[in-house]
Amino acid sequence: MKSKKLMGTLGVVFLFLIIAFFTEKREEKAEEIPVVGVLQYVSHPALDEIYNGIQKGLKESGFVDGENIKIIFQNGQADQSKLTTMSQQLIQKNSEVLIGIATPAAQALANSTSEIPIVLGAITDPVSAGLVETNEKPGGNITGVSDKSPVDSQLDLAVSLLPKAKSVGILYSSAEENSKYQAAEAKEAAQGLGLTVKEYVVPSSNEIAQTVQVMSSEIDFIYIPTDNTIANAMQTVVNEANKMNTPIIPSVDTMVSEGGLATVGINQFDLGVQTGKMAADIISGKSDPATTPIYTFNTGDIIINEVQAKKLGVTIPEAVLKEAKLVGEE
């Protein structure tokens, strides 16, 4: 009887050791696969699409989360202190490559490490943001994708859709360097088209509703550069602008779907795919951030919210309609 009990006990112990052995091996294997740390500035449709694209780009390059890489995702929800803490956490996870979605996230990562490769996702002007030396030769541990919008084409489209417009209000946040850069570019382009330009700068999301109320009574249409603070409050902007039938020309495609009139925009998912592929090349040893140029899209799609156009009484020229992608639902 004692022999049977002893054999039973030994069997349990042996089984436990086998399970522990294979668990340890699985953990060791999990630790061996590359870690991709992703830091996103805030949640809104454009940045969420970029993250979806990043996963697709990695997968198309042969890297699948949970199989041969491990993606650790962090979202700072527009809180700078969280971005700093999360950057340090991603570094402590031994990330082989870091991805920053939007400028504040990329800057937080850059301030935390000068050694781990960083790939930029959706950074309008990496040079003025202090992230790279030049777009052609970044020179450090950072490269990536610019989401620089075709501002001239966007304002040309605005004029073709709104031929009676005489003035434009540029709405952006004072907290974002990219927005200031693009707002200046938009101001110059708009003045070149003979438009009167007024700038409306908000320090935070709390002032957006009131600011849009004021500007809707002072200008003919609103232009929004690439700005995460405004994008995160796009529904508020649309609601207030619609009260005065004021058209909105945003710089991002997803913001047209949310109630903007039209844009010439870069597809945010495609932007993410390119970001993912650049991260994959670094993991594979195919590229070095210091010598890999910032990727910039040369073309964009004309995107028009047909429902919003009807609501505002905007007639879409036939030539524009033939080239446009229509969005919006009744």
Image: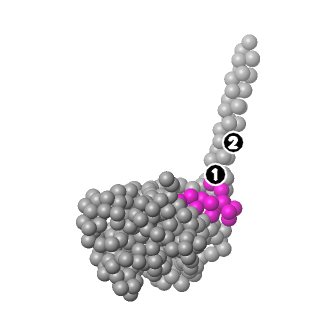
Label 2 Cα crowd, 10 Å radius (few <14 / some 14-19 / many 20+): few
Give the extent of the magenta segment.
Answer: 46-66
Type of amino acid at the residue the image marks with label 2: Phe
The residue positioned 40% from the left and 64% from the top of the image is 312
The residue positioned 45% from the left and 74% from the top of the image is 161
Q: Quadrant of the N terminus?
A: top right
In the rendered image, residue 56, in percent from the top left (x then y), is placed at 62, 60
The residue positioned 56% from the left and 66% from the top of the image is 325
| Tag nearer the camera, 2 or 1 | 1
Q: Nearer the viewer, residue 120 or 244?
A: 244
Examine the rendered structure and indicate whether residue 43 appears above or below residue 97.
above
Q: Quadrant of residue 70?
A: bottom right
Kindly give the residue lying farthest to the top in the view shown: 1
Label 1 Cα crowd, 10 Å radius (few <14 / some 14-19 / many 20+): few
- The CA distance from mark 2 to mark 1 is 17 Å
Residue 282 is covered by the magenta coloring: no
**Colour scheme used in the picture?**
one colour
Examine the rendered structure and indicate whether residue 97 appears above or below residue 136.
above
In the rendered image, residue 98, in percent from the top left (x then y), is placed at 52, 64
Q: Nearer the viewer, residue 279 or 41?
A: 41
Q: Is residue 229 visible?
A: no
In the rendered image, residue 276, in percent from the top left (x then y), is placed at 59, 65
Helix, strand or loop under label 2: helix
Type of amino acid at the residue the image marks with label 1: Gly
Q: Nearer the viewer, residue 278 or 260?
A: 260
Helix, strand or loop under label 1: loop
Q: Would you name the residue on which mark 1 appears?
A: 66
Q: Quadrant of residue 296?
A: bottom right
| Mark closer to the chain start, 2 or 1 | 2
Residue 22, numbered label: 2
